[in-house]
Amino acid sequence: MSFSLSKTVVSLDGEQLYSFEYAALMTETSITVLQVYVELGIIEPIGSMLHSHTIARIAQIQRLRRDLGLNLVGASIVLDMATEIAQLRAMVKMYQSHQEKPL
């Protein structure tokens, strides 16, 4: 698999996609570490590229590992749970706003 730091790609939904080299540089990690994350299912690439939200997830994982001493799987679970909680809160808020409207 070859990567290019200068390669610019836009996804079908119009989002900028970034190379593994760029992600490694931005998160102060290595391409090898990112490939392990992919193999473990911790991040999901689009072909050989990454969404910006995936790069943010990598940075969050690095921070949880560094600051809280969590292992890789633990950090991933924490982020997944935080995402799920945020989604549930949004659903509750939407449900509550529909319940408050008079018929």
Image (tube, grey):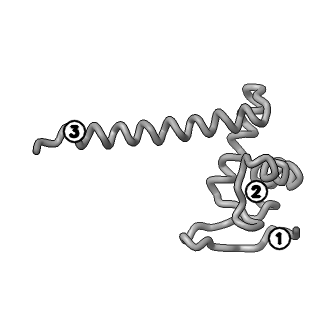
Residue position for label 3: 99
Real-space Cα separation, disc 1 to disc 3, in angstroms: 51 Å
Percent of width and height locating residue 99: 22, 38
Up-down relation of residue 52 to residue 15 (above or below) = above
**Label 3 Cα crowd, 10 Å radius (few <14 / some 14-19 / many 20+):** few
Q: Quadrant of residue 92?
A: top left
Q: Residue at x 48, y 39 (%)?
A: 86
Q: Residue furthest top?
A: 68
Q: Which of the pair 49/27 is nearer the observer?
A: 49
Q: In the figure, is residue 43 to the left or right of 100?
A: right
- Identity, as a three-letter code, of the amino acid under mark 3: Gln
Element at label 1: loop
Residue position for label 2: 23
Residue position for label 1: 4
- Identity, as a three-letter code, of the amino acid under mark 1: Ser
Q: Quadrant of residue 88?
A: top left
Q: Nearer the viewer, mark 3 or mark 2?
A: 3
